[in-house]
Image (cartoon, helix red, strand yellow):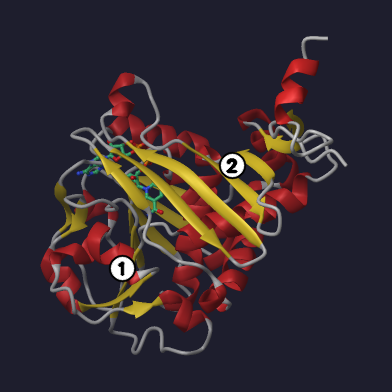
Amino acid sequence: MTLNLVPFVSVDSMMKLVLHLGIERVMVDLVAEIEADFRRWPMFDKTPRIASHSDVGVIELMPTSDGQTYGFKYVNGHPANMKRGLQTVTAFGLLADVETGYPVLLSEMTILTALRTAATSAMAAKWLAPKGSRVMALIGNGAQAEFQALAFKAVCGIQEVRLYDLDPAATAKCVRNLAGRGLRTVACRTAEEAILGAEIVTTVTADKACATILTDNMVGSGVHINAVGGDCPGKTELHRDILLRSGIFVEFPPQTRVEDEIQQLDPDHPVTELWQVIAGQAAGRNSAEQITLFDSVGFAIEDFAALRYVAGKVKGTEFCEMLDMIADPDDPRDLFGMVLRAAA
Ligand SMILES: NC(=O)c1ccc[n+]([C@@H]2O[C@H](COP(=O)([O-])OP(=O)(O)OC[C@H]3O[C@@H](n4cnc5c(N)ncnc54)[C@H](O)[C@@H]3O)[C@@H](O)[C@H]2O)c1
């Protein structure tokens, strides 16, 4: 056995894997994986992520386990990074065998986080958005944006994305990257213009503050809001009044109540857990007029599902390399001897 060797998926391999499979297929596959894990939600060990905050950002660990496999993700959120030429969000993650504790996969997760976040957003919209939605406003056109657009095209049938960002260069980048992918893109000069005619509104901006990307008067009845960018204490995107008019759907309340849009509400404000809708235990949208809000924060089970998907795809392929990561002496008590023998 070569338990010391752990499959490692580099950024280069992840990009090649995604291009090999096709990005829209990956989105559809990830929705199926995440949905399957949401259906068995009670089986998982769950804890709010462990966050280390600073003035400029946050570094978080996101662990979970289904009793057979354990997973965690390291992820940061640094809104000022972009101006320094760095990613706002970077990540990597690991899966391990619960039986032995030995790692079974190490993977980049900066790209995988963008994929799983977009897939989770589209999955929520599949259950909550008005049926037959074709137009989505996409406010915040940074690193996550194209992934969101393509997930909604592949999973929900969105045909038009109306783009807005404070920085027109970000919108131009999005229009360029989405060209030729079967989506109509409309570059807008204001958020108000972006939401015109949109059945779904995605906010995916980055600002370490309580921003107001959407004000109450901008949101008409029947709209589905996919609020992705607010995901830290003191970092929100929606005016509180919108929340008071919406049916609110969340991933894991103990995490969401601290980190997401609903941090603006009373701690006992009613919310519905998305997994319960998917498992048939709670109702989704209750009328054509209801505003539904997926208050997305990102939860460990989504990363776990994404990592397991990747593990299944890369096993025995050129999309991973084997890392000599775990000291595994033949005599388990002779760790020291193994070090000495390395000199020979
Ligand atoms: N919920 C989740 O699971 C999840 C997962 C990943 C990222 N995120 C969050 O999503 C957000 C976006 O991430 P990213 O990697 O795309 O960041 P990014 O820095 O690459 O892009 C953010 C964009 O938002 C724009 N922006 C900032 N304030 C704005 C405003 N008021 N109006 C319009 N546009 C504005 C910026 O100009 C930038 O182009 C971050 O806040 C990140 O923390 C959430």
Point 15% across, 49% down: residue? 211
Residue 48 percent across, percent down from the top left? 36, 60
The quarter of the rendered structure image containing the N terminus is: top right
Tell me if mark 2 has few (under 14), some (14-19) or many (20+) residues whose alpha carbon lies within 10 angstroms of its own: few
Q: Which of marks 2 and 1 is nearer the N terminus?
A: 2
Q: Which of 256 and 67 is in front in this view?
A: 67
Point 43% across, 75% down: residue? 274
Label 2 is placed on what type of residue? Answer: Gly
Q: Is residue 118 left or right of residue 136?
A: right
Tell me if mark 1 has few (under 14), some (14-19) or many (20+) residues whose alpha carbon lies within 10 angstroms of its own: few
Q: In this view, does 268 lie above or below 189?
A: below
Outermost residue, top direction? 344
Residue 232 percent across, percent down from the top left? 26, 51
Q: In this view, does 190 lie to the left or right of 59?
A: left
Question: What residue does disc 1 label?
Answer: 254
Question: What residue does disc 2 label?
Answer: 180
Mark 2 and mark 1 in contact? Answer it, CB < 8 Å: no
Label 1 is placed on what type of residue? Answer: Pro
Q: In this view, does 101 lie to the left or right of 93?
A: right
Residue 38 percent across, percent down from the top left? 54, 73
Distance Cα–Cα, label 2 vs label 1: 42 Å
| Numbered mark located on residue 325 in the image | none
Which mark's residue is nearer the viewer, 2 or 1? 1
Q: In this view, does 268 lie above or below 56?
A: below
Point 66% across, 58% down: residue? 98
Tag 2's secondary structure? Answer: loop
Q: In this view, does 205 lie above or below 172?
A: below
Q: Nearer the viewer, residue 319 or 2?
A: 2
Task: Examine the image and state in which quarter residue 13 appears.
Answer: top right
Q: Which of 310 and 206 is in front in this view?
A: 310
